[in-house]
Image: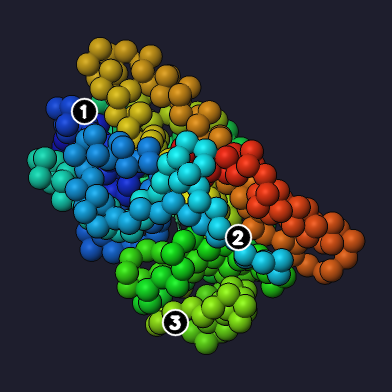
Amino acid sequence: MATAQVGVVILGAGPAGLVLGNLLLERGIDCVILERRSRAAVEGRARAGFLAAHSVRVLTEHGLAAGLLARGKTHTTCLFRSDRGEFTLDYGKLGQGEAHTVYPQQELVRDLVAEYLRRGGEIRFGAEAAEVTGGTVRVPGGADVTGRYVAGCDGHRGSGRAALTARGVRTARRDNGVSWLAVLVAAPPSLDAVGYALHERGFAGHMARTATVTRYYLQCPRGTDPADWSEDRIWDELVTRMRTAEFGPLREGTVLEKAVVDLRSDVLAVPGVGRLWLAGDAAGLISPSAAKGANLAVLQAESLARALETALAQNDRIGLARYAADCLPRVWRAHEFSHWMSGLLHGPAGPDDDEARYARQLQYARLESLRTSRAHQDFFAENYTGI
Ligand SMILES: Cc1cc2nc3c(=O)[nH]c(=O)nc-3n(C[C@H](O)[C@H](O)[C@H](O)COP(=O)(O)OP(=O)(O)OC[C@H]3O[C@@H](n4cnc5c(N)ncnc54)[C@H](O)[C@@H]3O)c2cc1C
């Protein structure tokens, strides 16, 4: 039974759905967000932290950046370590001269929920979209919701994406074959910059989050169970791979969270058909090696809001076709860079045979080129901060 008819039904209260909802309300378009989890769960989920300059501009232009401008931290450098030494790239002075703003995703989500509600928007927490047919969303245990359009912002395993692939929309995908143990620790950052450590035992990464919480990554074999990684094992491995004996100690603290992330990417051939349009991880998953996922979600939400406004006001789907045409090249460019980063960060897995030695030397050559070539550094900076 359909009990509600709105302009846009949005699935998912992640960065994509919440930015879209706020932008639609700003344009006077009625919408409702269906979110399968509780408000506390959504606002507590720590994931991304690096916002590109474009994301900050979008959020600022639409009155969504008060929190990140007040509490976010600007980052303009990153450093690379290997057995051949350490170097820092001041990417804020390279490429387009842009910076990252470090602001934990859960804090951004909290800000976006608060602003959406302040603007009069409706979010139904605990409402799982089970199926999307035309403009109607089936919610088990609740009333169906019908919109003139449905925006699937419900992530990679959501119903929006499932409905599109069921209609024959094809995917392009790549599995990097690598996984990361993603760890959040209760400790201040140990470096002023993002740190990428290349090591024969696998990649290790250091990412600042706040003054009291830091994210670390450890490359691990596919199928790793986080339960096998005790706190001691995590710190031993970080100390080894970050080469603290040579470059100085890490500030250790309690492990707050640990999860395994498989580095996989995919992109749907088109991000929508008919009345169903996707944004964010629903439209394509990008491996976290270049920290692009949340930024693509903001970019797509902004474009989709514009396209839906035209579609609703003028009953004209040209804007939606343009959404696909505008976004896909930028999405692919982010994927290309993410893939490039993955090649830089991950050495060969498996036995030390001829192929592994070849792959290791390519990794060193790429790192050396980044250390010494201004053209290569500009390429890095432009793609690292751009979206
Ligand atoms: C460890 C880690 C670190 C990362 N670091 C970065 C980074 O530094 N920078 C960066 O840009 N990106 C990063 N990312 C990626 C980034 O977090 C995601 O790309 C981003 O969350 C995508 O936003 P989204 O709104 O599309 O999807 P999500 O954040 O996944 O939100 C989707 C929402 O939909 C809800 N939902 C799912 N199914 C349904 C359903 N059927 N019905 C209703 N609701 C549903 C979910 O509960 C969720 O709240 C990282 C990811 C991970 C895992």
Indicate the quadrant where residue 73 lies: bottom left
Gap between marks 1 and 2 measured at Cα = 52 Å
Q: Residues within 10 Å of mark 1 (few under 14, many from 20)?
A: many
Where does residue 120 sit, x and y in percent of width and height? 9, 40
Where does residue 213 sit, x and y in percent of width and height? 36, 71
Q: Nearer the viewer, mark 1 or mark 2?
A: 2
Where does residue 151 sit, x and y in percent of width and height? 33, 35
Q: Assign a secondary structure to mark 2.
A: strand
Q: Which mark, residue 7? A: 1
Q: Is residue 51 left or right of residue 366?
A: left
Q: Residue at x 26, y 26 (%)?
A: 148
Q: Dividing the image into 4 quarters, which one contains the N terminus? A: top left
Indicate the quadrant where residue 197 lies: bottom right
Queried on whether the Cβ of the residue with tag 2 lies below 8 angstroms from ligand 1, the answer reads no
Nearer-the-camera pick, 33 or 64: 64
Vertical side of 30 occupied by 357: above or below = below
Q: Is residue 255 left or right of residue 308?
A: right
Q: Amino acid at mark 2?
A: Phe
Disc 1 vs disc 2: Cβ atoms closer than 8 Å? no
Gap between marks 3 and 1 measured at Cα = 50 Å
Q: Amino acid at mark 3?
A: Glu
Disc nearer the start of the sequence (2/3): 2
Q: Assign a secondary structure to mark 3.
A: loop
Q: Which residue is mark 3?
A: 252
Disc nearer the start of the sequence (3/1): 1
Q: Residues within 10 Å of mark 2 (few under 14, many from 20)?
A: some
Vertical side of 36 occupied by 333: above or below = above
Q: Which residue is mark 2?
A: 87
Residue sticking out furthest to the bottom = 232
